[in-house]
Image: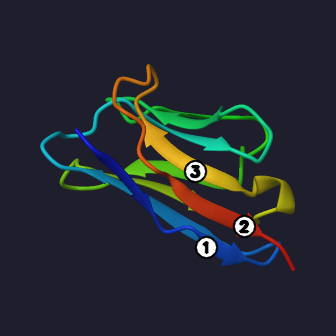
């Protein structure tokens, strides 16, 4: 299984981005988005369960939305009201980090 994240880029503070994650050969059930800022450890940003229950890190609650598309082999992260501190490489994986890590997608929030 190879996870492929995309949709990152450079955006001004207050802007929005929509990240996507795809993988061949599997359907997503319990999944998560993570991010790693320069010099920091990878952190959990958002999770979604098979029952579509979601949970978010306090730092992104109310601004980010995680969802699974249809068919269930695409994962999204809608990011609104972006802040400079959201700058990081974003990765997708399961909440238990079942799959090999992909390369992630760079999100840079800067004016």
**Which callout, 3 or 1, points at the residue further toward the start of the chain?**
1
Other-residue count near label 3 (Cα within 10 Å), few / some / many at <14 / 14–19 / ≥20: many
Please identify the residue farthest to the top as the structure is shown. Answer: 96
**Residue 79 % position (x, y):** 63, 61
The residue nearer to you, when weighing 89 against 30, is 89
**Residue 12 % position (x, y):** 79, 78
Which structural element holds mark 1?
A: strand
**Residue 17 % position (x, y):** 59, 70
Q: Tell me: 37 left or right of 21.
A: right
Q: Quadrant of the C terminus?
A: bottom right
Task: Identify the residue shown where x is 72% and y is 31%.
Answer: 41
Q: Quadrant of the N terminus?
A: top left
Other-residue count near label 1 (Cα within 10 Å), few / some / many at <14 / 14–19 / ≥20: some
Quarter residue 46 falls in:
top right
Task: Identify the residue shown where x is 19% and y is 40%.
Answer: 27
The residue nearer to you, when weighing 70 against 96, is 96
**Which callout, 1 or 2, points at the residue further toward the start of the chain?**
1
3D distance between C-alphas at marks 3 and 2: 10 Å
Residue 9, numbered circle? 1
Which structural element holds mark 3?
A: strand
Q: Mark 1 and 2 residues: CB-CB less than 8 Å, in contact?
A: yes
């Amino acid at each position: 299984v190879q996870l492929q994240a995309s949709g990152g880029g450079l955006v001004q503070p207050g802007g929005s981005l929509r990240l996507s994650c795809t993988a061949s050969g599997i359907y997503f059930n319990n999944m998560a988005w993570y991010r790693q800022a320069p010099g920091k450890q990878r952190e959990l940003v958002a999770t979604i369960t098979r029952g579509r229950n979601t949970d978010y890190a306090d730092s992104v609650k109310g601004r980010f939305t995680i969802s699974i598309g249809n068919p269930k082999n695409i994962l999204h992260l809608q990011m609104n009201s972006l802040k400079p501190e959201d700058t990081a490489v974003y990765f997708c994986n399961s909440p238990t980090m079942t799959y090999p890590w992909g390369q992630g997608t760079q999100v840079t929030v800067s004016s």
